[in-house]
Image (cartoon, rainbow, N blue to C red):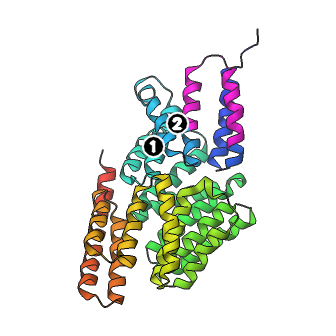
């Protein structure tokens, strides 16, 4: 009879797997999952270790962008995690990974509420990398609802920790980019662009190609806002030209293609813009990304099939989801286009809508902090 593996040994292998996931090392994570799965088959029975496996698997699915699978796993362990005597580490993972799922689905308020629940267990976790990851992720969620000072505070904490760990350069890069993004929103444009460039250089030096992709995307967004359209186009095209597996990060490439289409439309390069819009639309359909489906329709009704009635319907879809940043961004973009076309009545209408959307943004923070 074959001797069973000790559950503590399998738990150690799960820790190794999760370390690779936290580094966003897809190749190592995939390989370790296979090894962990085999070890589980040979393990003595231990329900907590099995729960730990399921939770880490839900996080792995998020990293490889299998979000529906992650949601199914989290739903399957919800009762066991919340209503049994599960140890605090596993409760933390459940709430934290649930927050991550909601963040990836752009439900930022739900994400922050889950993160707040996770935070109640954070002090019992000695691993400072876990603390860094928590601060980075909640910083990202606060950025999503335009709470830039809250976001900066958490991003600074994550960066301080990641700088002390040479195996987490890519997370140091992510923290730096998030700080830069917040500074840009706070009108510290030169500082933000400099930080993004610094992050790209660090990523390139350490062969983190996907982080380079993100860096060029971020710089493209900055320059599009500043109306440096040629420079923005160069950065979006650079992001797409970097040799990286696009199948692993479809949501990111959807965002890049959407922004490239928007820049080309603003440059009056309608045929090229339409090609990239169709490429973005195809990815949005493939990934079931409802927000981008709406934003792509908005582009269409601004630049290709001018129809303010249908445009208003799509903007209302964003309002219903309380995506006020997207409402403000899309209506301001529409207003600038209509002003350029000397359609001043429509331009005024959408500038006003952009201002009203911005006024709603602070209410998101109040809602997120409500228990």
What is the secondary structure assignment of the residue under circle 2? helix
Q: Is the residue marked by circle 1 packed among few (<14), some (14-19), or many (20+) residues within 10 Å? A: some
Q: Is residue 43 magenta?
A: yes
Question: Residue 198's x, y, as percent?
Answer: 65, 72
Q: Classify mark 1: helix, strand or loop.
A: helix
Q: State the image quarter where residue 190 is shown.
A: bottom right
Q: Which residue is mark 1?
A: 119
Distance from Cα at disc 2 to Cα at disc 1: 10 Å
Task: Specify start and end residues of the magenta stretch as a single range.
Answer: 30-57
Percent across and percent down for residue 155 are 52, 59
Quadrant of the rendering where the N terminus is positioned: top right
Whether residue 161 is visible here, answered yes or no, is no
Q: Is residue 288 above or below residue 184?
A: above
Judge by depth and name the residue closer to the eye, 264 or 223. 264
Q: Residue furthest top?
A: 1
| Identity of the residue drawn at 43% across and 51% down | 105
Find disc 2 in the rendering and name its residue.
Answer: 124
| Label disc, if present, on residue 270 of the rendered structure | none
Q: Is residue 21 visible?
A: yes
Image-based side of 275 in relation to 17, left or right = left
Reply yes or no: does residue 79 show up in magenta: no
Residue 266 shown left or right of residue 346 in the figure: right
Of pointers 2 and 1, the one earlier in the residue sequence: 1
* Residue at figure coordinates x 43%, y 48% from the top left: 102
Q: Is residue 276 above or below residue 54?
A: below
């Amino acid at each position: 009879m074959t001797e069973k593996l000790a559950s503590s040994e399998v738990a150690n292998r799960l820790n190794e797997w999760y370390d690779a996931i936290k580094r966003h090392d897809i190749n190592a994570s995939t390989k370790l999952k296979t090894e962990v799965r085999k070890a589980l088959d040979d393990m003595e029975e231990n329900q907590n270790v099995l729960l730990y496996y399921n939770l880490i698997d839900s996080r792995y699915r998020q990293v490889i962008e299998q979000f529906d699978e992650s949601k199914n796993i989290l739903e399957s362990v919800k009762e066991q995690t919340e209503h049994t005597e599960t140890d605090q580490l596993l409760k933390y993972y459940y709430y934290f990974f649930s927050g991550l799922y909601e963040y990836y689905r752009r439900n930022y308020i739900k994400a922050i509420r889950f993160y707040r629940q996770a935070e109640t267990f954070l002090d019992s976790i000695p691993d400072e990398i876990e603390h860094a990851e928590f601060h980075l992720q909640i910083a990202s969620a606060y950025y999503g609802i335009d709470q830039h000072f809250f976001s900066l505070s958490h991003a600074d904490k994550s960066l301080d920790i990641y700088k002390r760990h040479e195996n987490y350069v890519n997370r140091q890069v992510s923290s730096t980019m998030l700080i830069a993004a917040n500074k840009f929103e706070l009108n510290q444009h030169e500082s933000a662009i400099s930080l993004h460039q610094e992050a790209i250089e660090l990523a390139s030096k350490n062969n983190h190609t996907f982080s380079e992709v993100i860096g060029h995307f971020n710089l493209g967004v900055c320059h599009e806002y500043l109306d440096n359209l040629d420079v923005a186009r160069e950065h979006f095209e650079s992001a797409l030209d970097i040799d990286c597996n696009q199948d692993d990060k479809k949501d990111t490439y959807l965002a890049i293609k959407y922004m490239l289409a928007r820049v080309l439309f603003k440059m009056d390069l309608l045929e090229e813009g339409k090609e990239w819009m169709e490429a973005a639309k195809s990815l949005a359909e493939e990934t079931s990304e409802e927000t981008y489906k709406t934003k792509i329709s908005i582009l269409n009704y601004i630049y290709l099939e001018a129809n303010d009635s249908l445009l208003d319907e799509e903007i209302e879809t964003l309002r219903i989801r309380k995506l006020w940043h997207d409402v403000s961004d899309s209506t301001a973009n529409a207003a600038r286009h209509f002003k350029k076309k000397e359609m001043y009545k429509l331009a005024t209408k959408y500038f006003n809508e952009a201002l009203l959307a911005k006024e709603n943004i602070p209410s998101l923070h109040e809602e997120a902090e409500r228990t």
